[in-house]
């Protein structure tokens, strides 16, 4: 579940063919491998577009392939039109697809664009982690730990990666959680009903409440009924807007397990990094979990893709959200688009 961005203006193709290469400021061409081999080449020849893109497929929040939340990361997609990024995303049919541009391996930075099948997003959790892990694998030598500054829309997200035996550990800084007002009474019951929960299944000691670490989630705590939760309200997004939330996260605080969906209720997310920070902030705010101690949030059991998201509070109150990233596949898109 992710933060949407406003509609973008249409792109126009330059009349001349382009060779798009990775920028590595400060490297001086020394010490780092050329990324020409992973460059995206988009040529307009007699109104026929040829696409040549290298990609990595990873599973985020899992040490094993074919678990966790799948992600395709397209390498060096600089100047690739948004419409083509959207088409590539629809082709691979992952919940989201990440496109890397302006990669500077020496400086530890890159720009990241994130798409669902419907739209481009301003932020999403597991694409940030997956993209950082892929950048780690592009380093010329195995680094014990690296830090990254990933520009996503109008914000820059700090990430850390560390190599492990068969996977990459990745974490991102989600900042300090902001806790909104409690939602009680009739509004709270309306959210309960919209999520197909029965009377009595809401947690008796914890409130429905909006929490944000940049993307506001409606945290709906339950002590029973997580398995029956689903969105059954025809205008759920409008209902959420009344509370200032973008998405809902149904959370069992006793099992530390959660579920969330797109607002139409069509697709359940396997593991939601952008919700893990708000969920952890909520639990610490209400004393369910001690402040300053790491916790593991489970998700994906009901999709057949069990995942574990780690949240580590820093001494400054900022939450670092992450987990392992397992490689699955690599390859190229090489296609004529018209």
Image (cartoon, rainbow, N blue to C red):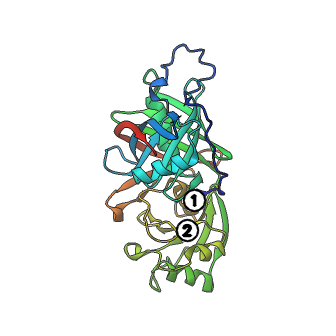
* 203 left or right of 335 in image: right
Q: Is residue 153 above or below residue 179?
A: above
**Residue 293 in view here:** no
**Residues tagged 2 and 1 counted as in contact (Cβ below 8 A):** yes
SS label for mark 2: strand
Residue 89 locus on image (x, y percent): 46, 50
Q: Tally the numbered discs.
A: 2
| Direction from residue 259 to residue 183 in the image, left or right | right
Residue at figure coordinates x 43%, y 65% from the top left:
267
Q: Does the image show residue 99?
A: yes
Q: Residue at x 62, y 82 (%)?
A: 187
Task: Say the numbered circle drawn on residue 218.
Answer: none
Q: Which residue is mark 1?
A: 278
At horizontal 63% and vertical 19% (from top left) the residue drawn is 26
Q: Residue at x 58, y 63 (%)?
A: 282
Spatial separation of the CA atoms under disc 2 and disc 1: 8 Å
What residue sits right under mark 2 in the picture?
Answer: 219
Q: Mark 2 vs mark 1: which is more N-terminal? A: 2
Near mark 2 (Cα within 10 A), the count class, few <14, some 14-19 or many ≥20, is many
Up the image or down, 241 lies above or below 109; here it is: below
Q: Nearer the viewer, residue 216 or 333?
A: 333
Q: Quadrant of residue 137?
A: top left
Q: Give coordinates of residue 190: x percent, y percent.
A: 56, 83
| Outermost front residue | 46
| 209 sits to left or right of 232 | right
Mark 1 Cα within 10 Å, few/some/many (few <14, many 20+)?
A: many
Q: Secondary structure at mark 1?
A: helix
Q: Position of residue 21 (x, y in %)?
A: 54, 27
**Whether residue 274 is situated above or below residue 75 in the rendered picture:** below
């Amino acid at each position: 579940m992710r933060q949407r961005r406003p509609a973008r203006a249409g792109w126009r193709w330059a009349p001349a063919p382009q060779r798009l290469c990775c920028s590595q400021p400060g490297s001086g061409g020394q010490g780092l491998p050329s990324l020409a081999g992973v460059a995206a080449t988009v040529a307009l020849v007699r109104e026929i577009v040829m696409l040549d893109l290298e990609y990595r497929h990873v599973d985020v929040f899992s040490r094993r392939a074919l678990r966790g939340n799948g992600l395709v990361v397209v390498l060096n997609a600089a100047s690739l039109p948004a419409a083509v990024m959207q088409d590539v995303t629809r082709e691979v049919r992952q919940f989201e697809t990440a496109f890397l541009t302006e990669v500077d391996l020496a400086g530890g930075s890159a720009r990241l664009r994130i798409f669902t099948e419907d739209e481009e997003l301003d932020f999403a959790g597991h694409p940030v982690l997956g993209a950082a892990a892929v950048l780690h694998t592009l380093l010329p030598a195995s680094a014990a730990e690296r830090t990254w500054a990933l520009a996503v829309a109008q914000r820059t997200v700090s990430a850390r990666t560390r190599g492990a035996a068969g996977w990459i550990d990745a974490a991102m800084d989600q900042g300090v959680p902001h806790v909104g007002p409690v939602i009680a009474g009739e509004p709270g019951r309306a959210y309960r009903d919209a999520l197909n929960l029965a009377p009595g299944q809401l947690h008796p000691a914890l409130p429905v409440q909006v929490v944000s670490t940049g993307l506001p989630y409606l945290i709906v705590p339950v002590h029973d009924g997580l398995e029956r939760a689903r969105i059954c309200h025809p205008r759920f997004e409008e209902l959420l807007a009344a509370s200032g939330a973008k998405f809902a996260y149904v959370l069992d605080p006793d099992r530390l397990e959660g579920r969330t969906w797109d607002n139409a209720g069509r697709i359940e997310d396997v593991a939601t990094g952008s919700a893990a920070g708000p969920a952890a902030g909520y639990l610490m705010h209400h004393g369910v979990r001690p402040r300053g101690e790491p916790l593991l949030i489970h998700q994906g059991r009901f999709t057949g893709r069990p995942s574990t998201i780690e949240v580590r509070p820093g001494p400054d109150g900022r939450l670092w959200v992450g987990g392992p990233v397992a490689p699955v596949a690599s390859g190229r898109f090489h296609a004529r688009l018209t």
